[in-house]
Image (spheres, helix red, strand yellow):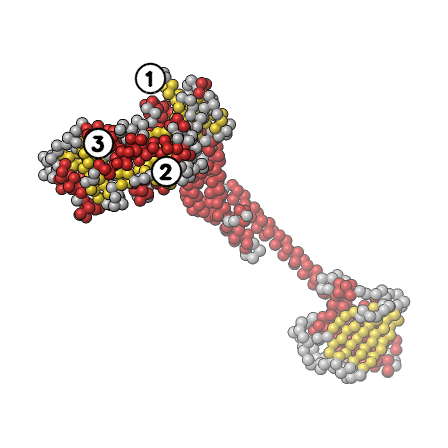
């Protein structure tokens, strides 16, 4: 929890805890010493009190004056530590060891034998055994002091007895901890604001480093490097140096990324050019075949006209393809006709013949088609050529053109391996442009999107693969959705 | 500084200061006080001395002692002019003393002796017969309520001094209450008037003790003078004491003493004490 706090709080808090801990440790260490000193002082006091009590009670004992001895004890016991709390008491005993008077008569009953008896767990020696001052130390720390009272000529008159209970010798934690706590409290009062100030001062360069780190990637690295604080502190200096190095390495990396991006762009441009060449090359193959047909069968009027129309439409397709690369260019285009399907099939024929692929077509037009012929021909040719490739040698390809009042749909089925949706998406993804043929499918998806239509895999078709392209059957002059 | 020193200092102070310059040359009248009253309150004694001095036109001072015998000695030696003593020393030394005034307590010149015990004692004394083997506190060997009555009662129940664990004199009725309250003694014999006055003044020793037995009524401790007293103000002192209940200042002082006033009194007031003393061997009264 402490680690979560800011340094300007952690530092004063840590200092305060350190002071408090020190105070407590000092108290713990000092307590036994203090208790030992206090015990010695208490024993000295008891010794002096015994001397005083003996001297003062001597004439009273001689006069057999119980009341005056009691009055003396009542006043004198106040000298004993712990008397006020009932942990110390005194008595004057007669020659037989009976209580002549006690400071607490309820505890030290008048006339009760004490010497030679066990009193509150303390075995007291018999009168005959006490010839001089005796101090009995109990296991629990309590003491009992017995001192004979003798006249000037040595006659024994009685005894003084002083008891101090164990709690008076125990360390007084409350009294000892009080000054420690007061000192710690004062230290905290002084250290808290000082620690806060020191913490804030210490953290100022760190905060600046944090600010610089937070702006990395958003601002100019060169300017950020200028703002990294320079400090004499070794640890902070290491942090600043690390941040500076990080920014420098980021500068290098950014330059490398820019170079890589530039190279990527160049590669993409190359792929695009290759794809465009592919798009233009597709109809060119068909057109070249048409010119050979013209040269062979040019004598036939019908063949010549048919080949002428084929050449015109193929060239229009090439112009549309080129125009698609110039978004700002406006191209006048005619609506799709059923003959366009046959043209496309004818253009794909050389590729199909090369692979011995059988290509069949079918047109089912219920309503007049208003879709642009250029875009549709490009789509149909791309899909046919892809299907021929996918069908493989001796495969079959079937193209169907449907049109009703709402939409125009073109579906191509090939007998090749089944294409999954994931594989299709990978093929048409912009990033997978290494294969120029993938570019063809990508163009189909783009045209479908531009004309608010769709291009997708027909999952239900099996075996082989069936791709379906459709766009709304709208007027030709309507603008595509965008580029 | 103990009570005696305080009183000495107070007496010296009041003799020189409170009487004033006008009475500096006037005759002195010294009155001895004993434990029959709670007479160790310096402020009260100063007011009373001033009250008497103004009315007697002389310097009145009090001489207080804890015990009766020193006061009697001073009186017989002529060192004091009057003394407030117990009825027992009065009957004992009746031939050498003359009654000056007898206080009225609860409207009568009579009082009782109490047998008291500590409230907190585990084994409670219920009467005189229970004192066998116990520690007993007397007040003074010349006290009626604090010794003589107890002697008569102990004799009645057949307990001799040797039958008790210990007996001692506490040199004053108040000390009897304190000795019993502290359980220094299991029981004590005390002047009933003093104990009631202590209780009235909320003294802790009275609160920590309780009365087990009350004696028959006896003559209240009187103020006496030596039978041969010749002091010119003695008669005036008697008249002033008898008239104290007649003025506000006097009544205030009497209230502080928990008394109603003074009467001249007669020796017959002390007949019960006299009879009791005669029954107690060694009482000195025959």
Residue visible at 23% across and 33% down? B90
Q: Foreground residue, A121 or A462? A: A121
Q: Foreground residue, B154 or A453? A: B154
Packing grade of label 3 (10 A; few <14, some 14-19, many >=20) is some
**Measured Cα–Cα span from mark 2 to mark 3:** 30 Å
The tag earlier along the polypeptide, 2 or 3, is: 3
Which label lies toward us, 2 or 1? 2
**Residue assigned mark 3:** B94
Q: Quadrant of the N terminus of chain B?
A: top left
Residue B112 is drawn in which quadrant?
Answer: top left
Which label lies toward us, 2 or 3? 3
**Measured Cα–Cα span from mark 1 to mark 3:** 43 Å
- Label 3 is found on which chain of the structure? B
Residue visible at 46% across and 43% down? A16
Packing grade of label 2 (10 A; few <14, some 14-19, many >=20) is many
Which of the numbered marks, if any, corresponds to residue B105? none
Which label lies toward us, 1 or 3? 3
Secondary-structure class at tag 3 = helix
Q: Is residue B25 left or right of residue A147?
A: left
Q: Position of residue A295 (x, y in %)?
A: 86, 75
Which of the numbered marks, if any, corresponds to residue A152? 1
- Marks 1 and 3: CB-CB under 8 Å? no
Which of the numbered marks, if any, corresponds to residue B116? 2
Q: Foreground residue, A265 or B177? A: B177
Q: Position of residue B105 (x, y in %)?
A: 26, 43
């Amino acid at each position: 929890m402490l680690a979560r706090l800011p340094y300007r709080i952690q530092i004063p808090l840590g200092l305060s805890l350190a002071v408090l801990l020190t105070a407590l440790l000092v108290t713990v260490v000092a307590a036994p010493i203090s208790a030992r000193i206090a015990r010695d002082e208490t024993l000295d006091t008891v010794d002096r009190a015994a001397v005083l009590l003996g001297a003062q009670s001597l004439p009273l004992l001689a006069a057999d004056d119980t009341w005056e001895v009691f009055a003396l004890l009542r006043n004198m016991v106040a000298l004993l530590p712990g008397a006020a709390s009932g942990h110390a008491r005194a008595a004057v005993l007669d020659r037989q060891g009976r209580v002549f008077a006690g400071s607490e008569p309820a505890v030290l009953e008048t006339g009760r034998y004490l010497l030679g008896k066990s009193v509150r767990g303390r075995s007291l020696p018999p009168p005959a055994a006490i010839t001089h001052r005796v101090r009995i130390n109990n296991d629990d720390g309590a003491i009992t002091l017995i001192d004979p009272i003798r006249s000037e000529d040595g006659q024994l008159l009685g005894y003084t007895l002083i008891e101090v209970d164990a709690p008076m010798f125990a360390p007084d934690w409350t009294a000892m901890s009080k000054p420690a706590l007061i000192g710690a409290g004062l230290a905290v009062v002084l250290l808290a604001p000082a620690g806060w100030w020191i913490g804030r001062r210490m953290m100022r360069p760190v905060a600046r480093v944090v600010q610089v780190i937070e702006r990395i990637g958003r601002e100019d690295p060169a300017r950020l490097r200028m703002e990294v604080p320079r400090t004499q502190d070794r640890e902070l200096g290491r942090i600043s140096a690390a941040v500076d190095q990080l920014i420098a390495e980021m500068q290098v990396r950014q330059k490398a990324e820019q170079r890589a991006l530039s190279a990527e762009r160049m590669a993409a441009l190359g792929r695009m050019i290759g794809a465009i060449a592919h798009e233009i090359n597709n109809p060119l193959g068909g057109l070249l075949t048409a010119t050979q047909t013209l040269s062979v069968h040019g004598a036939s009027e019908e063949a010549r006209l048919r080949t002428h129309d084929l050449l015109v439409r193929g060239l229009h397709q090439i112009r549309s393809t080129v125009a698609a690369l110039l978004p700002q260019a406006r191209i006048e285009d005619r609506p799709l006709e059923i003959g366009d399907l046959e043209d496309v099939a004818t253009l794909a024929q050389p590729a199909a013949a090369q692979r011995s692929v059988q290509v069949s077509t079918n047109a089912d037009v219920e309503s007049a088609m208003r879709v642009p012929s250029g875009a549709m021909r490009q789509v149909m040719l791309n899909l046919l050529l892809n299907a021929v490739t996918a069908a493989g040698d001796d495969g079959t390809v079937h193209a169907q053109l449907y049109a009703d009042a709402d939409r125009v749909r073109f579906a191509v089925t090939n007998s090749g391996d089944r294409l999954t949706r994931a594989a299709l998406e990978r093929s048409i993804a912009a990033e997978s442009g290494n294969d120029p043929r993938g570019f063809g499918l990508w163009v189909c998806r783009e045209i479908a999107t531009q004309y608010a239509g769709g291009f997708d895999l027909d999952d239900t078709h099996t075996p082989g693969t069936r791709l379906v392209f459709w766009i709304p059957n709208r007027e030709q002059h309507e603008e595509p959705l965008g580029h | 500084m103990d009570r005696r020193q305080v009183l000495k200092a107070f007496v010296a102070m009041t003799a020189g200061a409170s009487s004033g310059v006008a009475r500096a040359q006037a005759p002195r009248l010294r009155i001895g006080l004993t434990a029959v009253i709670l007479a160790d309150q310096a402020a009260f004694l100063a007011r009373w001395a001033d009250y008497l001095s103004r009315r007697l036109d002389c310097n009145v001072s009090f001489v207080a002692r804890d015990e009766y015998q020193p006061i009697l000695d001073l009186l017989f030696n002529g060192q004091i002019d009057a003394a407030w003593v117990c009825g027992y020393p009065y009957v004992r030394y009746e031939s050498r003393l003359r009654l000056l005034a007898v206080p009225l307590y609860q409207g009568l010149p009579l009082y009782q002796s109490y047998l008291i015990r500590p409230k907190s004692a585990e084994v409670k004394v219920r009467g005189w017969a229970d004192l066998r083997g116990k520690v007993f506190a007397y007040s003074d060997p010349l006290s009626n309520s604090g010794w003589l009555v107890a002697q008569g009662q102990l004799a009645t129940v057949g307990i001799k001094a040797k039958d008790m664990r210990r007996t001692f004199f506490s040199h004053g009725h108040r000390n009897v209450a304190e000795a019993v309250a502290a359980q220094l003694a299991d029981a004590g014999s005390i002047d009933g008037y003093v104990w009631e006055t202590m209780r009235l003044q909320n003294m802790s020793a009275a609160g920590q003790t309780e009365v087990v037995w009350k004696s028959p009524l006896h003559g209240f401790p009187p103020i006496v003078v030596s039978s041969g007293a010749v002091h010119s103000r003695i008669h005036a002192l008697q008249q002033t004491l008898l008239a104290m209940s007649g003025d506000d200042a006097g009544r205030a002082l009497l209230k502080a003493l928990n008394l109603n006033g003074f009467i001249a009194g007669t020796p017959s007031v002390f007949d019960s004490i006299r009879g009791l003393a005669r029954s107690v061997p060694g009482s000195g009264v025959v």
